[in-house]
């Protein structure tokens, strides 16, 4: 497909050069001329263009892979086709593959091997959480960027490639070294199959070599099925037992003996190099009774990938080959051997031909397992789904995952899907709902109301309760329910928040009080005072003539109160004819009955006054009360101006009075 170089696909992706390839596709370095960025373009090889089932799965899985977003997964940008050309456009990584690094360097430092495997496990865990099984994990599909970070690729085409048969020996050879036993048997591939492949990759990273090799894909696949894993420590003496245990557990022949999931393998690797675990006990796999049964032994593979049975006749190997004994036969004369050489050749030919026929006829029949149809268990309870699979001669393997739409304990999806034909006793992966994803309630105490609303974006609702306090600044969250750290479902949770407000109270009548008494009151009430002086004939020197706000006005902590302090009489007293005045105090009790107090009945009070200091009716106080209150209204009267007040209860005038000079 070198004729693609210099061409532009879909009027967007300019092909620069081929940078890799395999049995399924070729990879080119390209340029996205619209977004002006380098890309890697994977183009499906022409021999698969007529396979409609393969193309359908190729599209489906490649599209699914575009939903993956993880720092250790190569991003897929686009999937498409043009003129019978099927392609995937992905992130271009400058660097080498993990396979190339191992080939160049040999066994990797253990810390580096574990660090890279943790990154790879993170990527595969993300894929499994999105119900995608990679199916073709190998160092060739793991790229290392310039910073040495692992980037897993080939999520799309890997699963689609299972549609191709094993007869494409060259395309399978690169993957068979990492193939799980169930994959080698043609069984159902699950997340446990990826774990096996990850174990082989880890084996290769720490030893620099593969556990199984052979002349053909068939011979290597049979070793995955039949042969125990060669101990990694034999190839790398001094390997910590804890790390060898991780490799052995991941590559167990039976899926149920492997790690339950990639997260468990990740947790185990995190401590595998700790001093406490270096000399832990070896991991011993459970005895597999099936493995002790007789199986056909493959002696060697022919050049065409076929297998030859190791045929042996016990009769031939008994007395006829020995010298002496009643069955012994004297050696034939040399002349006789020369006459019968063609019979020996014919016998050898017939044996080889018969073995080859057996390999392609009898052996497949011995290993053949009946096909069954996978039932639809989606939305069933986990228990019912497993029972339905068992009735269909299949095994269900559950993996829990959060889901906002499917009820807890019910099946979200299954792999393979319903209607798929698989072998009896195959494993069907069930993704079971663990209910909506649980969130941790954030700590909101100490933040403002505005900040709390930002932090609670996406919650079902917020309910506020004010609390008067002087311990905290206004509008600060001081209590919350649910408590911080509790597990909740955000979209189903209404949060109750208590926030601080300034304490509001009625200002005392401080007229006539000394400055010292006023300052003590201000300190106790957390108020600020501003003072100025003025002569007064009626108020003793050093006492308050008046203040603003006026007495009994509602104030809050931190408010400023302005005071006028008496300087005493002026040196020259004003003549009687020069604007004489005097102050009177109107005492106004407002009673609330005991029954109204018990019921919490509230009355709206407004007092309006007018005297020599005002230019018209002025509001003295306006508030709501639920218990008896007494108001004291200071009035300044002169011979020309009386002092008056009017009391309103619930906007109705109930009392009015006036005071004249000299009364």
Image (cartoon, grey):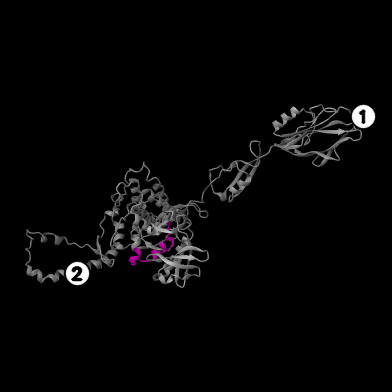
- Mark 1 to mark 2 CA distance (whole Å): 152 Å
Secondary element under disc 2, as helix, strand or loop, is helix
Q: How many marks?
A: 2
User: As drawn, is 243 to the left or to the right of 613?
Assistant: left
The residue indicated by pointer 1 is: 576
The image quarter containing residue 369 is bottom left
The magenta-colored residue range is 151-172
Dot 1 crowding, Cα within 10 Å, few <14, some 14–19, many 20+: few
Q: Secondary structure at mark 1?
A: loop
Q: Residue 87's x, y, as percent?
A: 45, 67
Left or right: 290 as drawn, with respect to 460: left
Q: Tell whether position 170 is magenta.
A: yes
Between label 1 and label 2, give the one nearer the viewer.
Answer: 1
Residue 456 in picture, x, y percent from top left: 59, 48
Report if residue 138 is visible in the image.
no
Q: Where is residue 466 shown, x and y percent of the image?
A: 66, 41
279 relative to 189, above or below: above
**566 or 454, which lies in front?**
566
Q: Which quadrant of the figure contains the N terminus?
A: bottom left
Report which residue position mark 2 lands on. 349
Give the mark, 1 or 2, whose residue is nearer the N terminus.
2
Question: Going by the picture, which residue comes out furthest to the right?
Answer: 577
Q: Which mark is residue 357?
A: none
Residue situated in front as seen by the camera: 400 or 84: 84
Quadrant in which residue 188 is drawn: bottom left
Q: Please state if 270 lies on the left or on the right of 656 as rendered.
A: left
Residue 80 in percent (x, y) is at 48, 67
Q: On screen, 291 above or below 596?
A: below
Q: Nearer the viewer, residue 602 or 285?
A: 285
Count residues near mark 2 (Cα–Cα under 10 Å), then give few for <14, some for 14-19, many for 20+.
few
């Amino acid at each position: 497909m070198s004729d693609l170089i210099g061409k532009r696909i879909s009027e967007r992706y300019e092909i620069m050069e081929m940078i890799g390839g395999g049995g399924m596709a070729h990879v080119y370095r390209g340029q996205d001329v619209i977004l002006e960025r380098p890309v890697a373009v994977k183009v499906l090889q022409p021999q698969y263009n007529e396979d409609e089932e393969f193309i359908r799965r190729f599209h489906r899985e490649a599209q699914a892979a575009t939903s993956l977003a993880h720092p250790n997964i190569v991003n897929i940008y686009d999937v498409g086709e043009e003129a019978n050309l099927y392609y995937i456009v992905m992130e271009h990584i400058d660097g080498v593959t993990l396979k190339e690094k191992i080939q160049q360097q040999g066994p990797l430092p253990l810390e580096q091997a574990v660090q890279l495997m943790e990154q790879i496990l993170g990527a595969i865990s993300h894929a499994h959480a999105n119900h995608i099984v990679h199916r073709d994990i190998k160092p060739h599909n793991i790229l290392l960027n310039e910073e040495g970070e692992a980037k897993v690729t080939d999520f799309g085409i890997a699963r689609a490639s299972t549609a191709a048969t094993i007869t494409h020996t060259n395309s399978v050879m690169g993957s068979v070294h990492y193939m799980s036993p169930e994959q080698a048997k043609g069984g159902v591939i699950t997340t446990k199959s990826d774990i096996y492949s990850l174990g082989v990759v880890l084996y290769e990273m720490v030893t620099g070599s593969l556990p199984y090799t052979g002349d053909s894909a068939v011979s290597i696949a049979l070793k995955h099925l039949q042969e125990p894993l060669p101990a990694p420590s034999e190839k790398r003496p001094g390997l910590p037992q804890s790390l060898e245990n991780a490799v052995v557990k991941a590559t167990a022949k039976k899926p149920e003996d492997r790690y339950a999931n990639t997260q468990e393998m990740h947790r185990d690797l995190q401590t595998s190099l700790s001093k406490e675990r270096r000399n832990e006990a070896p991991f011993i796999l459970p005895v597999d009774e099936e493995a002790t049964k007789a199986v056909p032994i493959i002696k060697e593979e022919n050049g065409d990938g076929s297998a030859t049975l190791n045929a042996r006749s016990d009769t031939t190997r008994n007395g006829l080959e020995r010298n002496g004994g009643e069955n012994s036969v004297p050696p034939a004369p040399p002349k006789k051997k020369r006459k019968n050489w063609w019979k020996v050749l014919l016998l050898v030919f017939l044996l080889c031909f018969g073995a080859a026929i057996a390999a392609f006829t009898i052996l497949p029949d011995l290993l053949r397992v009946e096909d069954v149809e996978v039932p639809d268990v989606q939305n069933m309870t986990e228990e019912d789904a497993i029972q339905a699979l068992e009735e269909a001669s299949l095994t269900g393997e559950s993996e829990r995952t959060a889901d906002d739409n499917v009820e807890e304990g019910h099946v979200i999806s299954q792999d393979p899907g319903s209607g798929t034909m698989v072998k009896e006793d195959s494993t069907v992966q069930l993704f079971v709902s663990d209910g909506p994803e649980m969130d941790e309630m954030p700590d909101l105490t100490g933040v403002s109301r505005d900040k709390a609303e930002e932090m609670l974006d996406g919650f079902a609702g917020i309910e506020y309760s004010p609390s008067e306090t002087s311990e905290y600044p206004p509008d600060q969250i001081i209590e919350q329910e649910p408590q911080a750290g509790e597990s909740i479902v955000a979209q189903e949770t209404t949060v109750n928040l208590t926030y601080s407000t300034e304490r509001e109270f009625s200002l005392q009548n401080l007229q006539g009080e000394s400055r010292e008494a006023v300052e003590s009151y201000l300190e106790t009430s957390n108020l600020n005072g501003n003072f100025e002086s003025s002569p007064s004939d009626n108020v003793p020197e050093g006492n308050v003539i008046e203040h603003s706000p006026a007495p009994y006005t509602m104030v809050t902590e931190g408010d400023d109160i302005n005071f006028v302090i008496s300087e005493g009489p002026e040196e020259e007293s004003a003549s009687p004819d020069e604007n004489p005045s005097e102050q009177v105090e109107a005492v106004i009790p407002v009673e609330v009955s005991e029954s109204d107090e018990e019921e919490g009945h509230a009355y709206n009070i407004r007092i309006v006054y007018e005297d020599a200091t005002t230019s018209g009716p002025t509001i003295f106080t306006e508030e709501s009360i639920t218990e008896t209150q007494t108001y004291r209204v200071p009035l300044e009267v002169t011979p020309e101006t009386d002092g008056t007040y009017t009391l309103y209860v619930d906007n109705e005038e109930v009392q009015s009075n006036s005071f004249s000079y000299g009364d």
